[in-house]
């Protein structure tokens, strides 16, 4: 029996190489397809087809990861700002802790004083020196026990040093705030005047105590400012920077500009602690006629005596 040969239709078997049905290219056609196919077309549907989804997936995952990190940072930042807003009063008017060593150091030298405020609050304080000598009233930093200043100075010839701790500080009862701080400073000055019946000759203020020293200035001959702060809002902003923008700060306790101008010719700025040097320079620049002294390791007693002498000329 004669075998029947099945051939493809001519429009399918264009190279006439297939005596039997074929479902793929012949070896010759594969070679032709390989050499004549567009290389870009080959890579696009080959290597690029497998690479592009990976790149897209990587970019998508990276974007979501960055957005997630950014979201976490925003939440942390908002939480920090919210916390600082809630604790602003405590940061602006911190309480001084009772300093045991300083109080023990002035025992037998300083005499205890009390100042009764208009609302009945009692402030504890000290007087160090001859009560008939001119009074030097010291306004401490908000978180400083007044006994620390007296322990460092020990004594000043011809000067009676008077200092009181603020409301809520160093065993005093009460809560310090912007509403009470200015009123308390005025009444402290009145209590100091009762020591020898004369208004204090010299006002000294450290840190934010400088605000009280300048704002209470009237008939005083001398003002000495130690590492002064003139605006609590500025001090808070400098401390926390972008974490607590200044426009969010509500505390408005600052020096009176009129008092500052009147006091500057009788004022000496004392550069004490290195950590506050830049701040002290900035505040000193606001006092056109003021003098300045750099402590530079000298005793506090010595630089205060020098400050008193310089203010007399």
Image (spheres, rainbow, N blue to C red):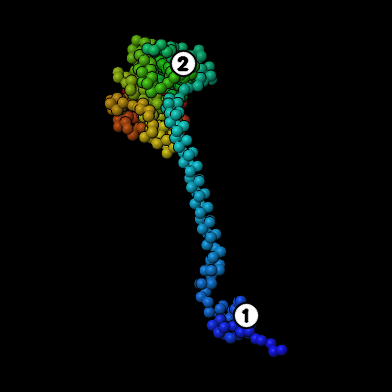
| First along the sequence among labels 1 and 2 | 1
Q: Name the residue at the bottom extreme.
A: 2
Q: CA distance from mark 1 to mark 2?
A: 106 Å
Query: In the figure, 81 relative to 142: above or below?
Result: below
Nearer to us in this view, 168 or 257: 168
Q: Which residue is mark 1?
A: 21
| Residue at horizontal 50 percent and vertical 12 percent from the top | 108
Residue reaching furthest front?
1
Mark sitting on residue 173: 2
Q: Is residue 22 above or below residue 115?
A: below
- Let me know if residue 77 appears in the view: yes
Asked whether disc 1 touches disc 2, contact meaning CB atoms under 8 Å apart, the reply is no
Q: Where is residue 12 drawn, in percent x and y?
A: 56, 81
For image coordinates 36% across by 22% down, the residue present is 212
Residue at image point 46% right, 38% down: 77
Q: Quick one: 299 or 198, which is closer to the camera?
A: 198
Q: Percent from the top left, x then y, of residue 31?
A: 59, 80
Image location (x, y in percent) of residue 263? 30, 25
Residue 205 appears in the rendering: no
Point 46% across, 16% down: residue: 173
Disc 2 residue crowd, few under 14, some 14–19, many 20+, Cα 10 Å: some
In-image side of 69 versus 269 (left or right)? right
Percent from the top left, x then y, of residue 87? 45, 28
Closer-to-camera residue (234/1): 1
């Amino acid at each position: 029996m004669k075998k029947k040969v099945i051939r493809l239709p001519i429009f399918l078997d264009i190279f006439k190489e297939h005596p039997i049905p074929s479902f793929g290219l012949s070896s010759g056609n594969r070679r032709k397809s390989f050499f004549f196919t567009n290389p870009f077309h080959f890579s696009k549907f080959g290597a690029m087809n497998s690479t592009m989804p990976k790149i897209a997936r990587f970019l998508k995952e990276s974007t979501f990861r960055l957005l997630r990190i950014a979201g976490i940072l925003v939440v942390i930042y908002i939480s920090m700002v919210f916390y600082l807003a809630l604790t602003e009063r405590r940061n602006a008017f911190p309480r001084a802790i009772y300093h045991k060593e300083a109080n023990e150091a002035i025992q037998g030298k300083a005499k205890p004083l009390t100042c009764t405020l208009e609302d009945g609050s009692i402030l504890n304080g000290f007087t160090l020196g001859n009560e008939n000598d001119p009074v030097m009233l010291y306004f401490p930093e908000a978180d400083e026990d007044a006994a620390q200043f007296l322990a460092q100075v020990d004594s000043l010839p011809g000067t009676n040093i008077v200092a009181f701790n603020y409301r809520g500080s160093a065993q005093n009862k009460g809560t310090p705030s912007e509403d009470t701080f200015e009123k308390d400073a005025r009444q402290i000055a009145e209590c100091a005047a009762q020591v020898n019946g004369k208004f204090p000759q010299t006002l000294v203020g450290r840190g934010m105590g400088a605000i009280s020293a300048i704002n209470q200035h009237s008939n005083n001959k001398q003002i000495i400012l130690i590492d002064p702060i003139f605006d609590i809002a500025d001090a808070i902003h400098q401390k926390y920077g972008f974490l607590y923008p200044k426009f969010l700060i509500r505390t408005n306790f600052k020096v009176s500009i009129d008092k500052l101008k009147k006091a500057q010719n009788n004022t000496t700025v004392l550069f004490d602690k290195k950590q506050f040097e830049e701040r002290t320079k900035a505040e000193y620049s606001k006092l056109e006629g003021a003098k300045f002294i750099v402590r530079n390791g000298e005793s506090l007693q010595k630089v205060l005596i020098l400050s008193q002498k310089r203010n007399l000329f």
